[in-house]
Image (spheres, rainbow, N blue to C red):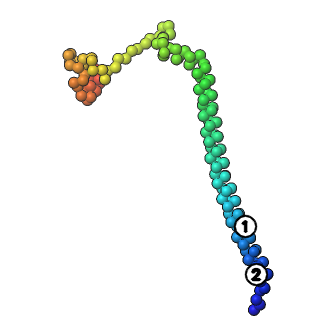
């Protein structure tokens, strides 16, 4: 068996160290590439989401600039009606304690249970 000389051993040690360093760098680069690809995918999803939101907002702006929307807002804010249009007003049945209970004059609603109010409402 031959014994290697010191310069030959040094050459193999240096090559081994270089191989280990190259392997570590390759692994680190591969991990960075994988992380960046995941980040790219998430950013692409975010861009897609923002583009959809922009399209929705554009539609909303177009609707709010229309005469139909302006008319609707004016009618609701000013309580206006169109000619020959009928308006139905519904009074609140529950929650108003100053009115008298249904079928029992003089008895206020605050003395009735919620169940009794529902029964009165349904049998009305």
Residue 108 in sight: yes
**Left or right, 59 with reference to 75:** right
Q: 87 and 114: which one is in front?
A: 114
Q: Residue at x 73, y 77 (%)?
A: 13
Task: Please determine whether, in this image, residue 91 is positioned above or below residue 118.
Answer: above
Q: 31 and 76: which one is in front?
A: 31
Describe the element under mark 2 as helix, strand or loop: helix
Q: Residue at x 50, y 14 (%)?
A: 75
The residue wearing badge 1 is: 22
Pointer 1 local density, CA inside 10 Å: few below 14, some 14–19, many at least 20: few
Q: Quadrant of the N terminus?
A: bottom right
Describe the element under mark 1 as helix, strand or loop: helix
Query: In this view, which residue lies farthest toward the bottom?
Result: 1
Q: Residue at x 61, y 27 (%)?
A: 59
Pointer 2 local density, CA inside 10 Å: few below 14, some 14–19, many at least 20: few
Q: Position of residue 37 (x, y in %)?
A: 67, 52
The residue wearing badge 2 is: 9
Q: In 3D space, how far apart are the residues under numbered discs 1 and 2 (Cα atoms)? A: 20 Å
Residue 102 in sight: no
Task: Please determine whether, in this image, residue 78 is positioned above or below residue 112.
Answer: above
Asked if the residue under mark 2 is in contact with the one under mark 1, i.e. CB atoms within 8 Å, the reply is no
Q: Residue at x 39, y 15 (%)?
A: 89
Q: Quadrant of the C terminus?
A: top left
Task: Please tell me the numbered disc located at residue 102.
Answer: none
Task: Please determine whether, in this image, residue 90 is positioned above or below residue 25.
Answer: above
Q: Quadrant of residue 46?
A: top right
């Amino acid at each position: 068996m031959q014994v290697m000389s010191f310069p030959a051993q040094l050459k193999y040690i240096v090559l081994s160290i270089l191989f280990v360093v190259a392997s570590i760098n390759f692994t680190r680069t591969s991990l960075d590439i994988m992380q960046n690809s995941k980040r790219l995918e998430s950013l692409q999803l975010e861009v897609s989401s923002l583009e959809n939101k922009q399209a929705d907002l554009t539609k909303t702006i177009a609707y709010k600039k229309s005469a139909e929307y302006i008319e609707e807002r004016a009618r609701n804010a000013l309580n206006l009606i169109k000619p020959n249009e009928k308006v139905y007003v519904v009074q609140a049945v529950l929650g108003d304690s100053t009115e008298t209970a249904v079928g029992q004059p003089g008895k206020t609603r605050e003395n009735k249970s919620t169940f009794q109010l529902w029964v009165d409402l349904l049998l009305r």
